[in-house]
Image: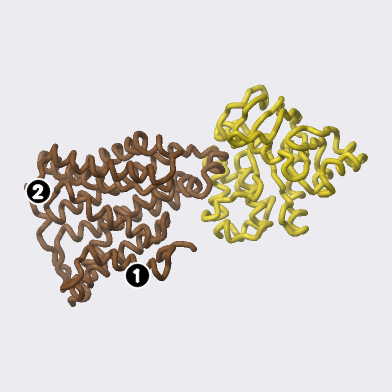
Chain colours: A brown, B yellow
Amino acid sequence: MLYIELALQGLVNGSMYAIVAVGLTLIYGLLRVLHVAHAGLFTLGAYITVLLTNATGSLVAGTLISMLVVGIVGMVVYRLLYEPLLAQPPYVALIASIGLFIAMEEGYRIIFGPYGNSFASTWLTERVTLGPFSMAAADVAMLLGAIVLLIFLAVLMGRTRLGMAWRATVTDPAMARSFGVDTIKVRYGIFFVASVFAAVAGSLVAVLNNLVEPTMGDVPSYKSLAIIVLGGLGNVTGTLLASLLLGVIEAYGTIYTGAYLDRDAIAFVFLIAVLMIRPQGLFGAR
Amino acid sequence: MLEVRDLVCGYGHLVAVHGVSFSVKAGEALAILGANGAGKTSTLMALAGHVDIKGGSITFGDEDVTRATPMDRCGRGIAITPEGRRLFSDLTVRENLMVGGYLRSMARAKINLEKVLDLFPRLKERLHNRAGSLSGGEQQMVSIGRAMMAEPKLMMIDEVSLGLMPKNVDICYEALDKLRSTGLTLILVEQSLERVLSIADQVCVLDSGAVAWTGSAGEARGNPEILDAYMGGAH
């Protein structure tokens, strides 16, 4: 029973990693930029959700408004930060992105204070019993949220013209333009979708921990970078599988290696081990 | 239909084409010939909007499209089948074709897809395969089909026969012949003369980024020494 519960817990964490990392990999695939400030949007999403939920009493309304606002902020970040730097070498955009992430964290500290915010009502911390298994309601919400978002993403990318345009733009932007794809709109669209995902992940983590603090994006930022490398940079399916795999490995690792290896260190031991065997990542093409 | 006047284009500081002029009437097929490095592909890519135009003008229909974006040109009816095909290799054949029809309504794209499959029946069984997994000949068919999906008035094809088996070259040229008979205007860039002269009405030979000779395809066939002088025996 312990093994199954650990696997479930791993899938819950893996789902959160997946929602954050898939946005990063979408953006990397399109612009070849490591969008570190994505984790800053994750934190922003959490803050907006907790503040609006406490103000209105509705978690759904809080989360929806958070998704919309963070999606728009993501597009603004693209316009003001990345677009002027696209002609520069990739490390310029990376440094700018790290700078923005630090600035966002400090901004949250100044605006919302250093001690964190919590939900006034905590019904999501109650436990749900499914047969022999017992999970926090927030864990169930995380799993369901991830499933809904990932199905939405699969349909968007595989069945819609925007998805086709995005994938064509990733392969050959000049040819995509030749057939009428507005690659600028595709970029804004992808930043919006990726940022909405970050907002959902931030909101779900806020509910899970019943705490939002300025530095809550730190762990997702470096762990999602490890995940997109593991998944094969720009590979969406690889990123999803790597997220779930890492979640499960961490869950078992905390039980069996917890005495000498911190939970957050497991991701990097795993990353180093994989890159020694497959430098292109678990699911990347050589 | 297309009038190119004193076109100067290139990449950054490098000028690849120095003052090229030619025109194509509606329904005509123009062959642009020349040895490697003569400026054929640069001219075609400039017409498609992918190379910096440093001077001259391009008029399509009655409109000046010299500064138009590739998207605008596609909307006005200019489509390209580029050198090396440049398919979206991770997308399926169907998706590649649908991207070709991106500016058209879904209903029109579906009608055009049927036309492409009528022209290249072999693609029917490949529709759900990744484009990158196809043979060179099949990829060329997808590339021509993708351009057809844009409902062009002018289709530009760069090195249709390059690297293909003779059987596939035949299939592609037969398809181009059929398209021409529907009134489509063609510009073909080729190093291989025999096939392209069988389909072209006019010939423009480029040498070192400038026009070296122009004339009808009949005149070109009757004067092999002219072509020899500029093609370096490539044909």
Q: Quadrant of residue B59?
A: top right
Tell me the amino acid under the disc marked 1: Ala
Tell me the amino acid under the disc marked 2: Ser
x then y, percent, for residue A179: 56, 40
x then y, percent, for residue A102: 23, 44
Q: Is residue A112 visible?
A: yes
The quadrant of the rendering that contains the N terminus of chain A is: bottom left
Q: Is residue B116 left or right of residue A179?
A: right
Q: Is residue B1 visible?
A: no
Above or below for A269 versus B53 = below
Chain name for mark 2: A
Q: How many marks?
A: 2
Q: Are marks 2 and 1 on the same chain?
A: yes
Q: Earlier in the sequence, mark 2 or mark 1?
A: 2
Element on which disc 2 rests = loop
Q: Quadrant of residue A96?
A: top left
x then y, percent, for residue A208: 16, 56
Quickly name the residue at label 1.
A273
Residue under the image location 92 percent in, 39 percent down: B223
Quickly name the residue at label 2.
A118
Badge 2 local density, few (<14 within 10 Å), some, or many (20+)? some
Badge 1 local density, few (<14 within 10 Å), some, or many (20+)? few
Chain name for mark 1: A
Residue under the image location 30 percent in, 37 percent down: A72
Q: Quadrant of residue A19?
A: bottom left
Element on which disc 1 rests = helix
Q: Nearer the viewer, residue A268 or B122?
A: A268
